[in-house]
Every structure is written in structure tokens, then in C-alpha cells.
Image (cartoon, rainbow, N blue to C red):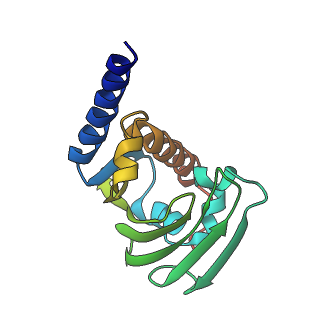
Amino acid sequence: MFKIIALVVAAVIALVLVVAAVRPDTFRVERSLVIQAPPQRIYDQIHDFHRWQAWSPYEKLDPAMKREIAGAPNGVGAVYAWDGNRNAGAGRMEIVEAVPASRVRIRLDFVRPMENTSTAELDIVPEGNASRVTWAMHGPAPYVTRLFGLVFDMDKMIGKDLEEGLRNLERIAETADTPAHG
């Protein structure tokens, strides 16, 4: 009886490992929101890391998080490094593409809790007097991430953060007196 139980357990473990191995080796999570504001007002918030504390959902994961903003003041070459608690982790972001009133692409280098490099993109497309803002995150999905994804829905986990960030950005951008910045 013990041998049968051990064989069944081993078979289940092997099956889980195989299923994780054949999952896609990349991930992409994307959310969009139409914001009643001109593209430039939204761009002013996303191409300047100094402004992220006001709208990024990741900023509230650790109130005591250490932050360092370096490089260019905004746009291409702007760098944001963080080191926080187990919820915030540690890493570095660098703006690698900035198209005024249109797009910001960021290289994300995660150090903790798991090393990984991903890309975040914030695209702004005019829609009448409003703007459709799409926040996407994509990158490699190493084996551990694929295994983790069997239990946790990565799209829902990351997606809820992107949705919250877009709603925060909406609140700020729809405020008429938001000043323009560099």
C-alpha cells in the first residue's frame, strides 16, 4: 500500500513539473483605461519617476522603502532604484524609450525576491478629448515562475496592480490644475 501511495505522489509531482516545463517561457500582462485628459498631461506623470509616488501602486507596498532617483531628471536615462520589505522587494528601473505624449518603455531589473529582467510599457493613444492608457509588463518566465503560475494567476496578481495604478493616474491626470513638467 505504501508503495502505491508513493508511486501516485511521485507521478503527481512529475506531472506538475512537466506541465510547468511546457508552459510559455514568456509572460505578458496588460491593462487599459480611458482617461479624460490630454496625452501630454498623462505623459508628464509617467516619464518622471519623481511623480510615481503619487500614482504607482507599488509605492505603497512599503512606506519605509528606500528610493533613489538618478540619471536624467526624466525621460530616457532616468533611473529609479528601490529597496524595500518582502512585499516591495528590490530592483531598478530605467526609462529606455520616451516618446512625448505617446509612450514610455522601462527596463525593470528585479533583484529581490527573485532576479529577473522585464519590460514595462505605458502607451497613450488619443481618443477624442480623452486618452487610452495601456500599461503592459512582459518578459521571460523562468521555470520557477512557470511553476509558481500553476498555483497563482500571474495575470490577476500583476493585473490588479496595473489597474490600480491606472485608476490612480486617472485621478491625478483628470485634475485640471495638474502642472506640466519637463
Q: Tell me if residue 100 comes above or below residue 169 in the rendering.
A: below
Residue at 34% across / 33% down in the picture? 13
Residue at 59% across / 49% down in the picture? 57
Query: Which of the 4 image quarters holds residue 69?
Result: bottom right
Residue 151 visible in this rendered orientation of the protein: yes
Q: Is residue 65 left or right of residue 41?
A: right
Residue at 64% across / 50% down in the picture? 87
Query: Which of the 4 image quarters holds residue 49?
Result: bottom right
Q: Is residue 23 left or right of residue 142?
A: left
Q: Tell me if residue 32 comes above or below residue 92 in the rendering.
A: above
Q: Nearer the viewer, residue 93 or 166?
A: 93
Residue with the most extreme top position: 1
Q: Position of residue 135 (x, y in %)?
A: 39, 54
Question: Where does the N terminus fall, quadrant-wise?
Answer: top left
Q: Position of residue 168 (x, y in %)?
A: 57, 47
Q: Nearer the viewer, residue 167 or 145?
A: 145
Query: Which of the 4 image quarters holds residue 38?
Result: bottom left
Q: Tell me if residue 43 comes above or below residue 31 in the rendering.
A: below
Q: How many labels were placed on the picture?
A: 0
Q: Position of residue 151 (x, y in %)?
A: 41, 33
Q: Position of residue 7 (x, y in %)?
A: 31, 25
Residue 132 visible in this rendered orientation of the protein: no
Residue at 70% across / 60% down in the picture? 84
Q: Tell me if residue 4 comes above or below residue 36 in the rendering.
A: above
Residue with the most extreme bottom position: 71
Question: Where does the C terminus fall, quadrant-wise?
Answer: bottom right
Q: Nearer the viewer, residue 11 or 176?
A: 11
Q: Nearer the viewer, residue 157 or 38?
A: 157
